[in-house]
Image (cartoon, grey):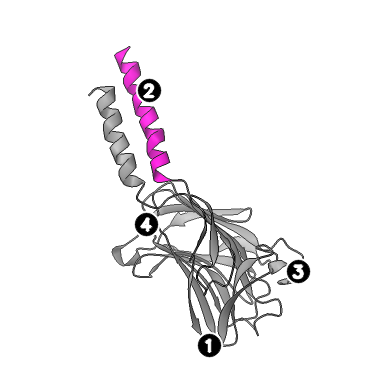
Amino acid sequence: MKASRFAAILVLAAASLSQGATIISYTATSDPAGSPDGTITAGGSGTTNVWSTSTTAPGGSFAGNSGGNGDGAGAGAGANAWGIWSNTSGQSNAIHTLAGGALSVGQDIGLDFDNGFVDAGATVGVSLRNAANNNLFEFFFTGGNSTYSKNDLAGALSTGLGFTDDGFKFSFRLNSTSGYSASLGATAFSGSLTAGGGDQAITNVRVFTVGNGTGGAQRDLFFNNLTITPEPSRLMLVALGVVLVGVRRRRK
């Protein structure tokens, strides 16, 4: 097949894939229950509605400075971050639906995360879910434990990261249709997604807090700077370059 035909085919494929999840970054501006609640800082411009929220009382959401969360010593999630809180039997969730569709192989999700103090028996974390809201991957911390846990095909296991109230960067990469690598700050691990009831397409991100103290008082959950990268069309352009180089070498 001629190089020009290869190029045409792959450019069309890139155009098709670019309709999927795209490179984009969101930064907090206001309460995640509000609209708009964030600014598009890459992959576009202006304000947008990043999160939807659901709450079982007592709980709620707000925007604020995470610098005073926990002992106030860490970087946290920024001076103007999204926040959710829960109290006793309460629960708060913030959900982001990927605007471009399901996460593609080779793409990453990133989020600044600051849980502050976590009371015994309370749980905080992040879930990556399919369209039916089945958890495909989750990391969480339950008060009273010594480390953060992950929940995937292998079940609930320790990530190896000890508790911190100072915040960290959560990063997740989809390496194959079911395999992933992830990190909480400098602590890296990998595994396989849960079966998800037969659907392993990651379409939404859920941040949650369950039964954690009185709200405020250094026990809020702050999060910020949600990113989804790289753009599938960029991956296709790399593939296009590789194919064209190969075709050119064959013709020599």
Q: Which residue is mark 1?
A: 57
Looking at the magenta stretch, what is its main secondary structure? helix
The quadrant the N terminus occupies is top left
Above or below: residue 120 compared with residue 50: below
Distance CA(mark 4)–CA(mark 1)? 31 Å
**From where the camera sits, is residue 200 visible?**
yes
Circle number at residue 102 = 4
Q: Amino acid at mark 1?
A: Ala
Quick one: SS at disc 4? Answer: loop
Q: Which residue is mark 2?
A: 245
Distance CA(mark 3)–CA(mark 1)? 27 Å
Quick one: SS at disc 3? Answer: loop
Q: Which residue is mark 3?
A: 72
Q: Can you give x and y, in whole percent of width and height, for residue 19 in the image?
A: 34, 50
First of labels 4, 1 by sequence position: 1
Quick one: SS at disc 1? Answer: loop
The quadrant the C terminus occupies is top left
Check if mark 3's residue and mark 1's residue have beta carbons within 8 Å. Answer: no
The quarter holding residue 158 reads bottom right
Q: Can you give x and y, in whole percent of width and height, for residue 131 in the image?
A: 34, 66
Q: Amino acid at mark 3?
A: Gly
Quick one: SS at disc 2? Answer: helix
Q: Of residues 188 and 7, which is closer to you in this image?
A: 7
The residue at the point 41 percent across, 52 percent down is: 179
Distance CA(mark 2)–CA(mark 4)? 30 Å
The residue at the point 39 percent across, 61 percent down is: 203
First of labels 2, 4 by sequence position: 4
Residue furthest front as drawn:
46
First of labels 3, 2 by sequence position: 3
